Image (cartoon, rainbow, N blue to C red):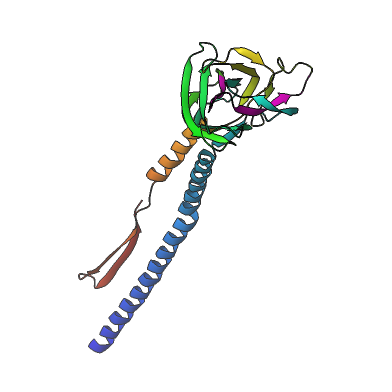
Amino acid sequence: MKTFVRTIILTNASERKARHGARRNTQIRDCFYSTLFGELPGYFCIGAMVLALAANLASAQETINLTSGTDGSYMSDQSYNETRAADVTVLSGTDLLVESMTLTGFYFNNWVTSAVVGARIYNTSTQQLIASANVTDSSGGPVTVPISATLVPGGDYRLGFFAATTPANGGIGTFFLPAGENPWLIPYTEADGLLRINGAYDIQPDSFPAYLNEAVPQVNLQVVVVPEPACMGLLAVGVTALLFRRHPKPATHKYGNDFATGSTKSAWTHAE
C-alpha cells in the first residue's frame, strides 16, 4: 500500500513538473517573440532615423562654383595684378561655414618667380574685411587657400582674390562673362542655389573691390551648410529615444515545495 501511494505521489509530481516545464518553455518563447516583434522593430525604426539624419549632416559639405548656374563665355589673357571679386547674396536658409577658397584660371608670365595669392571676404554693406588668408604660388594654376568665415542667410558679401607677382605685374587670368545683353547688371544663382551672384568688382590695391567689372573671377568655395534646426531636433529626439527606450525586465523563475500538501510550486513571472 505504501509503495502504491508513493508511486502515485511521484507520478503526480512528475506530471506537475512536466506541466511546469512546458509552461516555462511557453513563457520563454513568448518573451522571445515579444522582444523580437515588439521591441526590435522600434529600435530598428529609431536607429534608421538616426542614421539617416547623421548621413544628412555628413553630406552638408558643398563646393560652390561662383561661375555655375548660367550660360556664358570665358575671357582669357586678362590682367590679374589686383583684387577681383564677385558680389553675392546668401540664399541658403542656414549659415554657410567657409573652410577654403579656390581660384582657378590664374597663371603668370614665364619671367615671374612666384605670386602671393590671397583669399578675401568682405561685408558688402560695411566694406569691412571679414576674413583673409594668403599663400605663395610658384607654379601657377588652381590655388586653394584655407580661410574661415561664416556667411549668414540674406547677407551680402564680396568674395574674391588678391594677386601680386614677383617681379610685379606678371599675373594673368581667365574670367567668366555671364550671358546677356548687359552682364554687368544681370544677377544669377549658382548651381547649388546657395548664393546669388550680383556682379563682379575689382580694385588695384589689396582693399575692398569697389569698381564694377563685367568679368567674374573663377572662384570655388568649400563650405559646410549648417543643418536646418528641424533636422537637429529630429536627431536629438532619435538619440534620446534610443537612450531612454523602456527595456522589459527578464523573466524570473520561482521554484519551491509546499511540504504541507506535498505539492511542487513552480512559476515563471515576466516583470513589467
Establish if 132 lies above or below 43.
above
Q: Residue furthest front?
A: 111
Which percent across, then down, holds residue 205?
53, 16
Which span is picked out in magenta? 158-180
Q: Residue furthest top?
A: 126
Q: Residue furthest right?
A: 181
| Residue 1 in view, yes or no | no
Can residue 128 be seen in this snapshot? yes
* Magenta region, main secondary structure: strand
Q: Is residue 23 left or right of residue 231?
A: left
Q: Residue 228, how many percent across, how many down?
A: 52, 30
- Name the one closer to the observer, 53 or 122: 122
Residue 215 spot, x, y in % from top left: 68, 22
Residue sitting at x 75%, y 28% = 73
The spot of residue 221 in percent (x, y) is 56, 31
Q: Quadrant of residue 170?
A: top right
**Displayed quadrant of residue 59:** top right
Q: Residue at x 60, y 17 (%)?
A: 202
